[in-house]
Amino acid sequence: MAESTNGEPRIGVYVCDCGTNIAGKVDVPAVVEFAGSLPHVAVAREYKYMCSDPGQEIIQKDIKEMGIDRVVVAACSPTMHEPTFRKAVQSAGLNQFLFQMANIREHDSWVTEDPVEATEKAKHIIDAAVHRVVFQEPLEAIEVPMNSDVLVVGGGIAGIEAALKMADAGHTVHLVERDPSIGGHMAQFDKTFPTLDCSACILTPKMSAVGKHPNIKLHTYSEVTEVDGYVGNFKVKVNKKARYVDIDKCTGCMLCTEQCVVAKVPNEFNESLDNRRAAYIPFPQAVPLRATIDPERCLQLTRGKCKQTCVEACGPGAIDFEQKDELVELEVGAIIITTGYQTFDNERIARYGYGQLPDVISSLEFERISNASGPTGGEIVCKNGEKPRSVAILHCVGSRDENYNEYCSRVCCMYSLKFSHLIKEHLPETEVYQCYIDMRCFGKGYEEFYKRLMNEGVVFIRGRAAEVTAASKRQAETEGKLLVTVEDTLLGVVRHLPVDMVILSSALQAQPDAKEVAQLFGFGCSSAGFYIERHPKLEPVSTVTDGIFIAGCCQGPKDIPDTVAQAGAAAAGALALVDNRTVKIEPTISYIDPEKCSGCHICVGLCPHNAIVYDAELDAAQVIEAACKGCGVCVSACGSNVPVQRGFTDEQIFAEIEGALA
Amino acid sequence: MSAHEFEPRIVGFLCRWCSYNGADLAGTSRMKYPPNLIPIKTNCSGRVDPTHVMKAFAEGADGVLISGCHPGDCHYINGNWRTAGRYPMMKKLLEQLNIDPRRLRLEWVSAAEGDKWARVVTEFIEEVRELGPLGWKDQVADEYEQQEAVSA
Ligand SMILES: Cc1cc2nc3c(=O)[nH]c(=O)nc-3n(C[C@H](O)[C@H](O)[C@H](O)COP(=O)(O)OP(=O)(O)OC[C@H]3O[C@@H](n4cnc5c(N)ncnc54)[C@H](O)[C@@H]3O)c2cc1C
């Protein structure tokens, strides 16, 4: 085995039981005994929870009293607790880079079936770490200036809340929203459960506060296209799509809309229940209250020929068909992602008849028809304009179903109750049936709301609906009705409910482009597409990328109270960073010895971050420390092995390989 | 030793941003896969040098897996393209050394693909098991001894 270059090291190995998470599978005492027998290991110990204070104190005591000068902790993933242990060794006076973590939980005890095999694997993993740590060298974190501006991506209630919090704290906030207006889903609702506050009344003031805030730079109809850099110094490119309206001249008077000749564009805001024009403002409370010309529908933009009545109507001359997409470059210290959700595509469950039977509607469609500013002026009516005398609400459409989404969407039980209440309020004589699997009314005031609805005469049927069909024309009493077939599992009978309207309580799903957005910003998403938090309990709004946070439904389905709470937490997390003048970054970057470099230029062209320059005076390549991100490409590319990646030297990696295979 | 009893030893180089987190996700999701692969973390798969691969074989590995972010997702913009470019070259090198190139595998596993990680590891272990032991460590040691003998 290669010998240490730093004299005789004294290694301490600390093996964590993690309760039973590790010790339930791995024979920890055997692993400790093995570790103790490895070269240079002065002490090996077991403890129930190494990450706890007493656990950390064991390590610190050994450093101080036994002269331990290198530490290996065999426990969970370094993503979880590497910072914890680095801090612990540093505060005991040992450089934090003389520490190495051996992951025997995520990579071993949790994935290995057989205890004997798991124990053997743990030994190999620890052996690799012990071999490696011998060659580790003290390093100092590099301090770079912190940009105090922040970026928020997604202008739903989560993004609005986070942006306001940080702007109020005095930071410049860039809020990027891809639609022409901020507001997100909440802007579409009439009432919000369980208190039934009017959604517009609580959201509109926040939206206009965003629009007016001196510290908020609003980029609507825009998307982030490129992200580079690292915590404290992100460089972001935003594509501002051409809206063909000069936003500084437009007053939001809507005369262009009135004059626009293209009248049959499905109105997304009203879930396509009615139409809008090609020149439009999505809804009356839009922020910014500015027109947009739909490039896919405008005659001038699609065919190059139109009477241009909008141009004539526009007093301030705001319409500009020559406008181009604009690329804006932003520099920010931290980023919060709040891109929200989409609802389940109901047509995927053909037996519910969505898209075939006109009065089978989605939950968002119901939100719009029950809304006073919606397409029916708040009248709850069927497609033929008549008031429904009976309505069935089918729960868990696309949720809690292995064929679609295994998870519970968390808000559907509650919004279904809200719908029942709104129907009973508008149409007291109308029968309302709820076909549910379980009622999940978990939040504050939710169970009480459920009780209240039971007293409002709503019929609750426990059972997932089997199908929705058009009733046979031959039976006079049900003619023209929809038949909902459902097994009432409490009574043990199959029922056929004749109703006028069926509302599908559709699942909340990740945005269709969630994966691409996660990739763009460099963190993970679950197979369902929801963004993965750094820790499900203790770091619910951080991601694996330092300086990037998540909040709201992009992290998982949730209600507005939880969304707002997360947005506040993400804002606090970002503020805790950008309130500092500097940020420490990992010093695991490359170094090129000018004496050894022949100046061949190979690495210069390969460096992904243009962090290597050729210094003519030295006739050698040189690394720009602040630009190097530590990928190590130059190290493996150099024919003469000159670049060294600190913390990932060849010596260290070779030693790790030796240990893994010892 | 019959092929059935042979337990291959495999070293995996995992990039820190995608594959290491993907492997973590397999863990947090409690997916099960065989224990033959010992993971080694690098910042980027682009850091994996041909000498690391050769070192692993020389130390007794029967197979080497390199795993990084999907093309286009690299935390270092295009570090993984360098890996992809180097991979055929490394395979050629193995051929020249009479090592079956299937003993080296490159896979893209993202942080969201815990299931893929478990599948890739399982499949690769099975493939290497079929190829049988490499025994390069002993061979290298023998040759070294012979050389010593010749030069002595
Ligand atoms: C029918 C229904 C009724 C509901 N009723 C209630 C209720 O009464 N009470 C309650 O508490 N909760 C209710 N909810 C849940 C509520 O909708 C959510 O909790 C809340 O809207 C989540 O807010 P958000 O900001 O995370 O997401 P969203 O509201 O989805 O906002 C996300 C925003 O990000 C934008 N965006 C997305 N991708 C990008 C991108 N790549 N770049 C830029 N911008 C992007 C979107 O355009 C959107 O503006 C209901 C849900 C449904 C489906």
Image (cartoon, coloured by chain):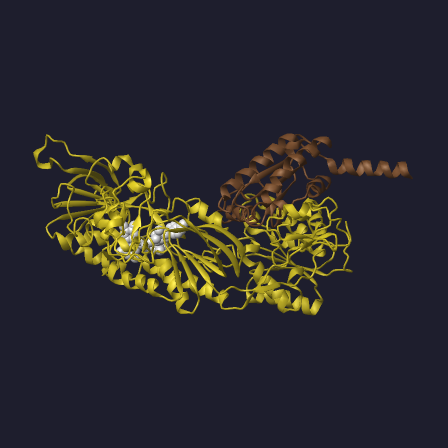
Q: Is residue A207 visible?
A: yes
Compared across the picture, whether A267 is left or right of A566 comes to left
- State which quadrant residue A100 falls in: bottom right
Q: Is there any visible trace of residue A660 in the rendered image?
A: no
Per the rendering, the colour in which chain B appears is: brown
At horizontal 57% and vertical 67% (from top left) the residue drawn is A54
In the rendered image, residue A10, in percent from the top left (x then y), is placed at 73, 61
Answer left or right for B37 relative to A430: right
Quadrant that contains the N terminus of chain B: top right
In the image, residue A462 lies at what x, y percent? 24, 46
Give x and y (percent) for residue B95: 70, 31
Residue A317 found in image quarter: bottom left
Q: Residue furthest right?
A: B152
Q: Is residue A160 left or right of residue A138?
A: left
Viewer-side residue, A454 vs A429: A429
Chain A tint in image: yellow
Q: Position of residue A187 (x, y in %)?
A: 28, 55
